[in-house]
Amino acid sequence: MKRVVVGLSGGVDSSVSAYLLKEQGYEVIGLFMKNWHDDTVTISDECPWLDDSNDAMLVAEKLGIPFQTVDLSEEYKERIVDYMFNEYKNGRTPNPDVLCNREIKFDVFMKIAMSLGADYVATGHYCRKSSIEKDGETIYQLLSGKDNNKDQSYFLCQLSQEQLSKTLFPIGELQKSEVRKIAAEQDLVTADKKDSQGLCFIGKVRLPDFLQQQLKPKEGDIVEIDSTLDQYAKDTKEDFNTTEEELAYLSKKFTYNFEDGKVVGKHQGAHYFTKGQRKGLGVGGTPEPLFVIDTDVEENIIYTGQGKQHPGLYRRGLFVSPHEIHWIREDLKLDTGDTMNVMARIRYRQTLEKATLHQTEHGLYVIFDNPQSAIAEGQFVAWYHDEELIGSGVIS
């Protein structure tokens, strides 16, 4: 009998995953990850880890499977939280959920599971796994979940072939409504439980409070940039000496100076804000809402523009440094000079957009057919062929 360790998170998705695997004849062990001890920054009634742990235990009891808690808070702080602080401090926007899957769930947690004699680790992600044979080798595929509203393949965009080979996604073929129905039929305590939101395994946090543990508040100016700024009107049909020059041009972010706009308010730290952000600026009285179009953490200035169509929000392309390029399908990896047509997204839940990958000796350019809003450095771009996520990278 194959043994599977299920990451029981105290939610309905992992609970039903455990139930389905048991029904399929696997020997199932439930493991709950405790990743955080500081409850002062969590909005306590949104996702308290103690309630989640108790619910996970009750589910294990109901299913008649062994259960234990593992404390990974040290690794989580080191690999996720410290990284987050550093990224925000440098004016970038990290994605802790993608990192948590790569660094904690499918690394530290997976190693613990294997030490318990597991053949596989299973999670409650809405995505699917398949495999093909190529040149006598088994190649694993990461496919989007059947429930388009819940597809979570993006969060797993940094997984490797080895990690995929040992992973099961029991609910990937199901709709969320079907998952809740199964939980209700089995009288699982999590059947009607709200989905947790916020940081992976910490819960919903007040991000400024969380960041203030390390990054101190510091008052600065909010500057509004007019949509008629000269650099927006630049003709993109310049003469380029090389293709890479053109790619770099299409991917280049706008840069601003204090003199380019007018001061419309104050903020408590540029490192608390991210591109595309609308809430939390505290500036009213403009005909259209203000959006963050850039942050300057060195000078502690937030640059904003009116309306979601402001040209400062949009770019055709982005760049991924060589060491940040990751191929799940290593057999499809591009060589220098190669291009590939893909569908790509730059954030979770974004509709997939047509794009072309251009591999150069200096890194990978992702050029979209249509300009994209709020491309944020530090976030992940993920690219797909049809339903299959084949690679990803950190936006430089």
Image (spheres, rainbow, N blue to C red):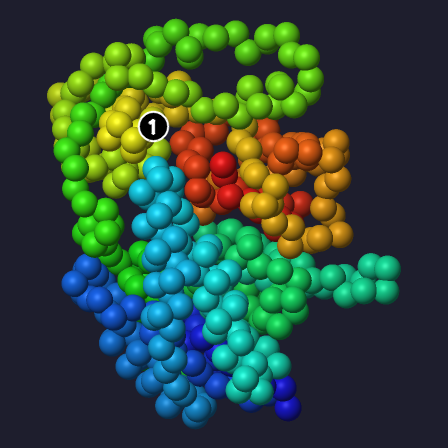
Decide: is 377 above or below 170.
above
Decide: is 61 above or below 94.
below
Q: Based on the displayed image, in which of its 4 quarters is residue 67 positioned?
A: bottom left
Q: Helix, strand or loop at disc 1?
A: strand
**Which quadrant is the N terminus positioned in?**
bottom right
Asked whether residue 257 is in view, the answer is yes
Decide: is 12 above or below 254.
below
Residue 73, how many percent across, how many down?
A: 34, 70
Residue 304, how many percent across, how many down?
A: 27, 24
Asked whether residue 206 is in view, the answer is no
Q: Residues within 10 Å of mark 1 (few under 14, many from 20)?
A: many
> Hey, what amino acid is under mark 1?
Asp
81 relative to 321 in the view: left or right: left
Residue 380, how many percent across, how many down?
A: 49, 45
268 relative to 236 in the view: left or right: left
Looking at this rendering, what residue extends furthest in the right direction? 135
Q: Nearer the viewer, residue 214 or 229?
A: 214
Residue 320, how many percent across, how many down?
A: 56, 38
Looking at this rendering, what residue extends furthest in the front direction? 298
Decide: is 6 above or below 385.
below
Q: Nearer the viewer, residue 140 or 195?
A: 140
Q: Residue at x 52, y 74 (%)?
A: 110
Q: Residue at x 44, y 91 (%)?
A: 66
Q: Residue at x 21, y 61 (%)?
A: 42
Q: Residue at x 30, y 74 (%)?
A: 52
Total marks placed: 1
Q: Nearer the viewer, residue 176 or 126?
A: 126
385 relative to 3 in the view: left or right: right
The residue indicated by pointer 1 is: 294
